[in-house]
Each structure stands twice: as structure tokens, then as C-alpha cells.
Amino acid sequence: MKIRKLTEDHLPKVQALLETAFPRSKYEERLVTKLHKNKRPLHEWVCIHRNMYIAYIAFSRAFNEGNVCGLHLAPIAVNPEYQKQGVGTELIKFALRQPEIKDKTLFVLGDPEFYTRFGFERCEQPICPFAKNNKNFLSIRNPGTEAFTVGYEPEF
């Protein structure tokens, strides 16, 4: 299993992976396609096993009134054949150690039981526009002292 920074050459395989990982939703694949089409700054990695793209993770900018205040972890995808085998866990651990990620405030909207393993904690502030009462909205290295609604890239 190798983890590589995403290149444009990887994008078609990542799009196929997103379709496989989210068979009932086109949202994730369309989101990544639009983010790339509009040249949004992203931090992305792919996990390759035997020339097969088995996992993907992306971080996009988080905003406080137009100013970057951290990063959003979304999406993360693992091929269903490789789920429940630690692939997603290893990819997240890897990403969290990378220089462009390791000191930033990070936000994620997801299962608290899963993400608390990596140091994420329930987030009181900022407010997530996609989570009623901030349910399942978590963060790392978040000062949480200022009340605001966190912004996402327009493609979200």
C-alpha cells in the first residue's frame, strides 16, 4: 500500500473510486470534479494497492468571513472491498502528519466515534451550516473562542 500526493493524472481514477465508495450518491464525485475544475486549493492524497486506487482524502479551505481559518476534511473515501481493514485510518493518520496539515485548525462533519480516535473533538464554535446544533461537527486545534459560521468553498 502506497500513499501518494494526488496529481492530475490520478483524477480519473479518484473519480471512479468516489463513484464506487458512494454508490448511492453522486455528490462526492461531483464535488471533487468541481473543486478541480475551479482550481480550488486542495491537499489531497491517494492510497494505491497493486495499481488499484483504494482510498482518497482531501482537505479544502475553511473560512471566517472570507479569511482562511483552517481546513475541512472532506471527502474521504475507501473502496468498499478495503473498508474495515484500517485503510482509511492509515490514510487519515498519514494526512494529519503532513506539513501542510499538521499545524492547521481542522474541521470535519462526520461520525464522532470514528474521528475522535484521531484527536478531533466536538466543536461548539464555529457553527457548521450543514449540521443542526453542530451535531457531528468536530475539530482539532480549534481555539473556538469566536462565534461565527464557518465557510466552505462554494462547490460545497
Image (cartoon, rainbow, N blue to C red):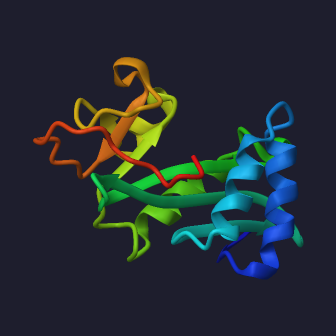
Q: Quadrant of residue 71?
A: bottom left
Quadrant in which the N terminus appears: bottom right
Q: Is residue 154 visible?
A: yes
Is 32 on the left-hand or right-hand side of 106? right
Please give the name of the residue rendered at 75% of the width and 51% of the height, measured from the top-left corner.
30
Q: Is residue 79 visible?
A: no
Q: Position of residue 82 (x, y in %)?
A: 80, 47
Q: Is residue 44 above or below residue 109?
A: below
Q: Position of residue 155 (x, y in %)?
A: 59, 52
User: Which residue is more in the foreground, 50 or 29?
Assistant: 29
Is 31 on the left-hand or right-hand side of 131? right
User: Which residue is more in the foreground, 145 or 111?
Assistant: 145
Please give the name of the residue rendered at 47% of the width and 36% of the height, measured from the top-left corner.
109
Please give the name of the residue rendered at 45% of the width and 52% of the height, measured from the top-left corner.
72
Q: Is residue 22 above or below residue 40?
A: above
Q: Position of residue 62 (x, y in %)?
A: 38, 54
Q: Is residue 129 above or below residue 11?
A: above
Task: Give the residue at the far top of this rendering.
Answer: 133
User: Which residue is more in the foreground, 25 or 155?
Assistant: 155
Q: Position of residue 148 (x, y in %)?
A: 22, 39
Is 133 on the left-hand or right-hand side of 77? left
User: Which residue is more in the foreground, 153 or 13?
Assistant: 153
Q: Quadrant of residue 32?
A: bottom right
